[in-house]
Image (spheres, rainbow, N blue to C red):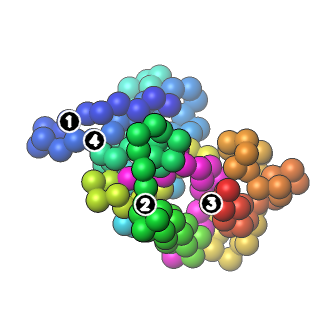
Amino acid sequence: GSVFKGVLPDGRLVAVKRIGGSGKQFRAEVMAVGRIHHLNLVRLLGFCIKSPLHFLVYEFMPNGSLDSWIFGKGRYLDWSSRVSIAMDVARGLAYLHDSCREKIFHLDIKPQNILLDGKMRAKISDFGFAKIVDKDKSQTITVMRGTQGYMAPEWLHSTITDKTDVYSYGV
């Protein structure tokens, strides 16, 4: 969905994501990030349903997405920043895969979904494709979705594991 910059009554800047359609993506995103908190995951502050639209309110990330730093003109990341960002994303994925009550497979890890805060700390965002599985399950079957070029080969067989996110992270 579309993302807009907003301001809360207390003056805090927020990102407001508008999601149309059936609400499946909205429910997936609220289920995935509504009850988890980690330094390297974008924090969901709230949501609003105004049929047929759904809105998610997230913390504002002033340095935008990683792709604008990698592919944008006039921006540069030194090696120290690159390593720090890579470690932040790895910590976020480790939390999703190993430290949550249930495992969460993000299923759409790509530079556009890695956001940078004011201190250039990386946070994983956009949980619209996320799949939640029981802690004792190591894999699940789902419909192929995500971004071409970042999807793991096992998608061809519809079986996904936490390695699916690790593959996308490596790309």
- Secondary structure at numbered mark 2: loop
Q: Which residue is mark 3?
A: 169
- Percent position of residue 79, x then y: 46, 65
Distance from disc 1 to disc 2, alpha carbons, whole Å, reads 32 Å
- Badge 1: how crowded within 10 Å, few (<14), some, or many (20+)? few
Q: CA distance from mark 3 to mark 4?
A: 26 Å
Whether the residues at callouts 3 and 1 have beta carbons within 8 Å, the answer is no
Say the numbered circle drawn on residue 37.
Answer: none
Q: Amino acid at mark 2?
A: Asp
In this rendered view, identify the residue nearer to me: 116 or 4.
Answer: 116
User: Separation of disc 2 and disc 4 at Cα?
Assistant: 28 Å
Q: Is residue 70 magenta?
A: no
Say whether disc 3 or disc 4 marks the residue closer to the N-terminus.
4
Mark 3 or mark 1, earlier in chain: 1
Find disc 2 in the rendering and name its residue.
78
Q: In the structure shown, which secondary structural element does the residue marked by tag 1 occupy?
A: strand
Where is residue 6 drawn, in percent x and y? Answer: 26, 33
The residue located at (36%, 61%) in the rendering is 121
Mark 4 → mark 1, Cα distance in angstroms: 6 Å
- Return the x and y of residue 101 as percentages of the image width and height: 52, 72
Q: Which residue is mark 1?
A: 7
Task: Return the disc, 2 or 4, that comes first in the chain's sequence.
Answer: 4
Q: Say which label, 2 or 3, has the lower sequence index.
A: 2
> In the rendered structure, are the residues bearing label 4 and label 1 in contact, judged by CB atoms less than 8 Å apart?
yes
Instruction: List the residue tagged with mark 4.
Output: 14
Q: Secondary structure at mark 3?
A: helix
Give the amino acid at mark 4.
Answer: Val
Q: Please provide the residue range marked out in magenta.
A: 99-116
